[in-house]
Image (cartoon, coloured by chain):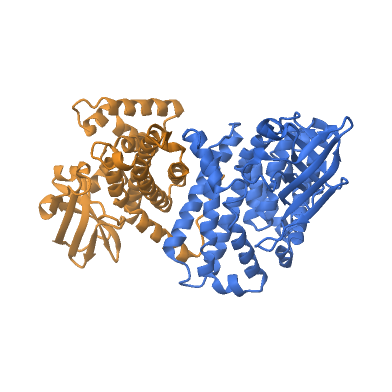
Chain colours: A blue, B orange
Amino acid sequence: MELDEFRESLDEWLASHEGSLRADPADADTLEGQLEQLTRVKRATYDAGWMRWGWPERVGGLGGPTLLRAYLGQALTARDLVEPGIYSMTEVLVPTMVDHAPPELAAAFVPRLLRGDETWCQGFSEPGTGSNLAALTCRATWTDRDWRVTGQKVWTSLAQYAQRCILLTRTGPPESRHTGITALFVDMDSPGITVRPIETMHGLPEFCEVFFDDVPVPLERTLGEVDHGWSIAMDLLPFERSTALWHRGAFLRRRLEQLLATAPAGALDPLEVGEVYQALFAFEARSRATQHRLGAGERLGPETSVDKIMVATTEQALFDLVPDALPAELLAGDDAVSERWRTQYLYSRAATIYGGTLEIQRNILARRVLELGPDR
Amino acid sequence: MMDEHERDLFERTIRSMFDSLAGRTLEESLRVAGWHEALSADPRTAISVLFELAGERNANPSIDPVVTRAFSPDDLRGALVLPPFGSCDAPAVRRDDVVVVRGLGTAQLLEGEWVAVATRSDMGTELLRVPMSQLDCRPIAGMDPGLGLIEVTATLAMAPPTGDDTTDRWEGALALGQLALSHQLVGAARSMLWLARDHAVERVQFDRPIASFQAVRLRLADSLVTVEAAEASLSAAWEVGSPFAAAVAKGVAGRSARVVSRHAQQVLAGIGFTAEHPLHRFVKRTLVLDQLLGASATLTRSIGEQLVRARELPAPLAL
């Protein structure tokens, strides 16, 4: 399947199925509603085949270029059928399984995630390790029978709904940093796991604290080699900054269109709108080139921090238009549309924080692209 | 259209042309190198390669062959008058039989007997042919004498318009010119970034290279991001091929070059403020290039106005 053919037939299919895929607008206000919607769309697109294109056949995919995934996410986001943040988690979780899980494990579980039968989460961040991932301390100890995991994760998206977790643990000595980390595939209903959703400023309890108290994990749930989990985390970052960002770009375009369509006359400053559009155009151009590099099998590296910085700053600049353009809706509206502007405006404050802060991204470029040497 | 191999070869030719100008003017060398033929065969490659390399080296190829491409030789028989600083409007306005010209020209303007002046009126844009003798031409030294710009002004009594509306051709000319200048701006911005980067790595203060200080690293990283943004926008604008996209690319490139110029000046500090260091030439040139065929501020506002009026966005780039 090539991109042009995929685009044409998917657009046609969506045109006739959009109605049945569309959420009850009231659902968009709650995380449960968004997840139900996500499940509905994933199931329908998986059963019709769309969701399987761009993934290898050995994990239930239908093969074909990764560009097909980029287009599917764009098409669903541009029609407001999914929230891009929770939709694109697949783009980060599945490549890890494809590249590092034992083949039978990947074959058994990946289709469940793609079809929306399961929700997964990613246990990376810890209270003491936000940007400094290599300092993680959540420990997995081998007991001759199984792994035992004890420790804490934080900012774990959707952990309260998840059936599985891709978890980074410390298996080497405490000071082993990059060389003593192991990735595990953990059942979230294992004994000893406690999940506590975090109340956040944007009102949706998307992120959680996850506590592990002597949690058993079988050996065959080890992803990659023991003590080599760092390379798994590194392999996944380019995915986090390619396909998923392209989807986010489609979301930002959609929201800018809605702002232009609904803002009262005179409420938008043309200079600011021009700046935001230019930033969006530049991001789309950059990200498209990245999708094609990925599609051509090129190995993506630190230069993808450029994409991440561009999308994050574009998102903030776009939502910075909203307080002046729609003050009554943003500050006082109690309808679903106003609620959505409010949630997304507040969420955009985190755009330069999650997935590697703006400062970390700029340091990556400084060290690895501009080759400025060490920073101390 | 050149294939990848031909493009590489062409780029090497233009690059070595710059390295061995040896007493020849840039225009002569471009003729010898076959650049004008390349411009007809594959405008995108000819323009992007030449203007980006020129930007990097602070060289100044004439924009005339680029902007006059949209017109037939019959229309022209002379150089085209460019809009005044900041503006991307046609440089002349007609009221009845009076035409007021306020624009700019390159050195080529003085070589011919005629110039072509795009003129706005209620009826659209007409292309007037005006004898040089009727124009006031003032060579501009100013910020960057090396550019050899000329200020053109005139108040002319002209016969009524012929009704031949050349708006499309004028917009096409403007768009190609904007793309060329954007490449020159990107090239100049890249050079400023690398001048600052090399200095930061070599310059030691407090027993460590200043590149190890966060404040310096963040400025350079931001410069890199903005140069990459300009480069990507330009490449997309060529593919989209609309005047709107060219204006977007010029807006992004102009702002990017000014941001990089500010960061590079700060990182280069004292040495970058001397006349001995090359930075000042790039700073001055990008300041002028930004103002030609639409300044970033003008273009950005105009793009925003068009979007606010239309209440929708142009179609996204196809994946």
So how many labels did they put on this image? 0
Q: Picture coordinates of residue A264 (x, y %)? A: 51, 72
The residue nearer to you, when weighing A290 against A20, is: A290
Among the 4 quarters of the image, the one containing residue B98: bottom left
Q: Residue furthest front?
A: B206
Residue A199 vs residue B8: left or right?
right
Residue A112 vs residue A12: left or right?
right
Above-or-below relation of B139 to A62: below
Q: Picture coordinates of residue A239 (x, y %)? A: 64, 40
- At x 85%, y 42%, the residue is A214
Residue A243 vs residue B125: left or right?
right
Above-or-below relation of A50 to A260: above
Among the 4 quarters of the image, the one containing residue A133: top right
Quadrant for the N terminus of chain A, please. top right
- At x 51%, y 64%, the residue is A321
Among the 4 quarters of the image, the one containing residue B92: bottom left
Can see residue B196? Answer: yes
Q: Picture coordinates of residue B6 (x, y %)? A: 41, 26
The residue nearer to you, when weighing A119 against A77, is: A119
Q: Picture coordinates of residue A5 (x, y %)? A: 64, 42
Residue A376 vs residue A161: left or right?
left
Above-or-below relation of B86 to B261: below
Above-or-below relation of A303 to B246: above
- At x 45%, y 57%, the residue is A275
Q: Residue furthest left?
A: B133
Can see residue B317? Answer: no
The residue nearer to you, when weighing B287 against B69, is: B287
